[in-house]
Image (cartoon, grey):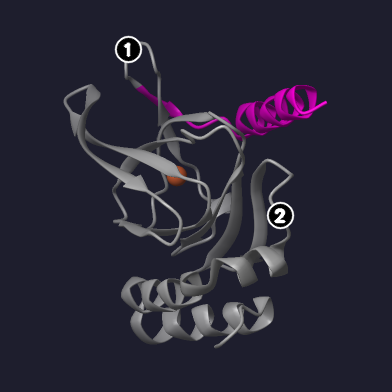
């Protein structure tokens, strides 16, 4: 793959996933991220906040995840492996570990343009977009992201609860509204 082509990329990720799983998918993503400009050309300059689906099947989901400026997403899990690659902006990840009834911070990954990051199936992370512009990332998951019930953790007392998808959608819509108002 020379210039980023979305259909070609989807095809390569799918075959890498069936041949080698997460490590194969990571290699394809790293290759694509050597040319961020052509990813933006293909996906468009990030303007719509949210997880925008690129591909979805029972064993693979590819999302274009766009974070609004300074957006924060609470600790959550995915119940499947995840591989993240940043094509514009930045993403700061906190990695959490379970401890009895709550979780505690166990690590961090600060991701810049061109960086990739892998999370195992049982990972818990929270995400901050630390920059005052949209961050765009390709997130690839080893399962059907939208059909899987996930957990999130309360930001006050760090206790686990089922992730509320409607609430998440609201949160992304509010982030979009804030962005639209601020840029008016
Ligand atoms: Fe996540």
Span of residues in magenta: 160-184
Mark closest to the chain's N terminus, 2 or 1: 2
Mark 1 Cβ and ligand 1 under 8 Å apart? no
Residue 56 is at least partly visible in this image? no
Residue reaching furthest to the right: 184
Magenta stretch: residue 70 in it? no
Local crowd size for mark 1, using a 10 Å CA cut-off: few (<14), some (14–19), many (≥20): few
Quadrant location of the N terminus in the rendered image:
bottom right
**Which image quadrant is residue 17 in?**
bottom left
- Residue 45 numbered tag: 2
Is residue 60 shown above or below 164? below
- Left or right: where does residue 120 sit relative to residue 171? left
Identify the residue at horizontal 58%, vertical 79% (top origin).
9
- Could you tell me how far apart the alpha carbons at marks 2 and 1 are, in whole angstroms? 37 Å
Where disc 1 sits, the SS reads: loop
Residue 162 in the image: x percent, y percent?
A: 46, 30
**Secondary structure character of the magenta stretch overall:** helix
Magenta stretch: residue 166 in it? yes
Is residue 131 shown above or below 79? above
Where disc 2 sits, the SS reads: loop
Local crowd size for mark 2, using a 10 Å CA cut-off: few (<14), some (14–19), many (≥20): some
Identify the residue at horizontal 39%, vertical 17% (top origin).
155
Most foreground residue, 28 or 44: 44
Looking at the rendered image, the disc whose residue lies closer to the viewer, 2 or 1, is 2
Residue 107 in the image: x percent, y percent?
A: 20, 39
Residue named by callout 1 = 157
- Left or right: where does residue 37 sit relative to residue 41? left
Rendering quadrant holding ligand 1: top left
């Amino acid at each position: 793959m020379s210039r980023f082509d979305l259909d070609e990329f989807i095809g390569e990720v799918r075959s890498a996933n069936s041949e080698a799983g997460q490590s194969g998918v990571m290699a394809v993503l790293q290759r694509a991220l050597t040319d961020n400009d052509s990813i933006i050309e293909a996906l468009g300059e990030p303007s719509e906040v949210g997880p925008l689906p690129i591909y979805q099947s029972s064993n693979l989901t590819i999302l274009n995840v766009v974070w609004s400026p300074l957006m924060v997403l609470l600790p959550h899990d995915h119940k499947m492996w995840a591989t993240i690659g940043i094509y514009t902006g930045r993403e700061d990840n906190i990695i959490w570990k379970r401890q009895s009834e709550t979780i505690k911070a166990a690590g961090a990954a600060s991701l810049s343009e061109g960086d990739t990051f892998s999370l195992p199936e049982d990972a818990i992370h929270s995400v901050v977009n630390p920059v005052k512009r949209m961050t765009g990332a390709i997130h690839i998951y080893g399962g059907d992201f939208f059909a899987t019930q996930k957990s999130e953790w309360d930001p006050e007392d760090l206790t686990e609860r089922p992730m509320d998808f409607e609430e998440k959608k609201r949160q992304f819509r509010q982030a979009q509204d804030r962005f639209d108002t601020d840029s008016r």
